[in-house]
């Protein structure tokens, strides 16, 4: 199931939950819950390319290509300078050759997926560091999730029932900080909606992984 579907399902469930809990049906509260629901409905797919990482995927492609182009261009330039016997310091030449080779190897041997995962993890690190600085444990937890999730196999641990209460803990932390009741429950329900929705696909979901690798499926 694609990201837009998960986003829509999460936002609708979150919006309905907000409608029930919003004082006098305040629109800003309903929209806030819809936003929480949409994000939670997409979070499980941080274990691969998704709507949340689309921009970072583009950046990773540019970075991957740039490393190859810059590395090879630098090697060709240094080779030409050496051939023409241009005068420069030997230590500078050695450092430049080493940097060019490293850049080329990083571009050729390290996949675009690695750079995407690294960029997503970098975002997680920034969230965790800011959460630590502010003493917001829920944000540290969210940062840890964002750091780890990209390196997990797709539809693996992030798509299990065990992550739902952990995501709920993050939601309850935000709930306590903002003083808005219902965020924790809404977070769990909308995260769970992602898992349930994927159970309707032919591939199914390993809901109880790693206890069992059995894929659970639902039929309409």
Image (tube, rainbow, N blue to C red):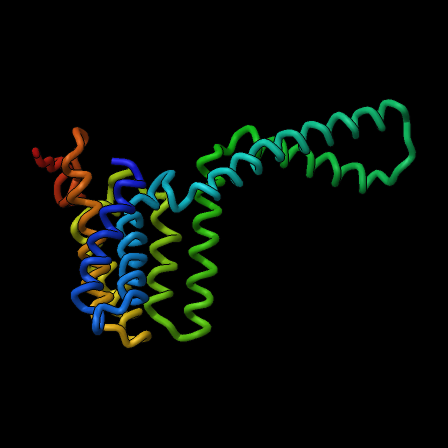
- The residue shown at (48%, 43%) is 56
Percent across and percent down for residue 53 are 42, 44
Which residue is pictured at 16% across the width and 65% down the height?
20
Q: Is residue 166 visible?
A: no
Q: In what quadrant of the picture does the N terminus appear?
A: top left
Give the camera-side residue of 42 and 145: 42
- Please determine whether, in this image, residue 12 is positioned above or below residue 176: above
Quadrant (top left, top right, bottom left, bottom right) of the C terminus: top left
Q: Position of residue 217 (x, y in %)?
A: 11, 35
Give residue 13's position: percent from left, percent from top.
20, 54
Is residue 128 depicted above or below 88 in this figure?
below
> What residue is at 22 percent from the left and 63 percent from the top?
18
Q: Would you say 206 lies left or right of 117 here?
A: left
Depth order, front residue of 38/163:
38
Q: Residue at x 19, y 45 (%)?
A: 195
Residue 3 relative to residue 202: left or right: right
Q: Is residue 185 visible?
A: yes
Q: In the depicted view, which residue is nearer to us: 129 or 10?
A: 10
Which is nearer the eye, 86 or 208?
Answer: 208
> Which corner quadrant of the image does residue 152 belong to?
top left
Find residue 114 and report its horizontal and vertical position in percent: 46, 38
Give the left or right position of residue 59, taking residue 213 as reference. Answer: right
Question: How many badges with numbers are in the image?
Answer: 0
Residue 212 quadrant: top left
Q: Is residue 196 above or below residue 135?
A: above
């Amino acid at each position: 199931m694609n990201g837009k579907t998960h986003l829509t399902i999460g936002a609708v469930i979150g919006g309905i939950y907000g409608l029930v809990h919003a004082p006098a049906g305040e629109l800003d509260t309903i929209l806030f819950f819809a936003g929480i629901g949409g994000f939670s409905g997409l979070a499980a797919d941080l274990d691969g390319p998704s709507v949340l990482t689309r921009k970072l995927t583009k950046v990773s492609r540019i970075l991957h290509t740039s490393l190859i182009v810059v590395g090879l261009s630098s090697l060709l330039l240094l080779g030409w300078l050496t051939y023409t016997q241009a005068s420069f310091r030997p230590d500078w030449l050695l450092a430049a050759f080493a940097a060019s080779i490293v850049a080329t190897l990083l571009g050729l041997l390290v996949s675009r997926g690695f750079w995407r995962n690294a960029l997503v993890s970098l975002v997680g690190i920034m969230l965790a560091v800011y959460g630590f600085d502010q003493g917001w444990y829920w944000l540290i937890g969210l940062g840890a999730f964002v750091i780890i999730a990209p390196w997990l196999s797709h539809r693996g641990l992030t798509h299990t029932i065990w992550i739902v209460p952990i995501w709920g803990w993050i939601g309850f932390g935000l709930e306590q900080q903002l003083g808005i009741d219902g965020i924790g429950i809404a977070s769990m329900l909308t995260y769970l909606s992602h898992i349930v929705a994927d159970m309707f696909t032919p591939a199914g979901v390993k809901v109880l992984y790693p206890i069992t690798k059995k894929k659970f499926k639902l039929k309409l």
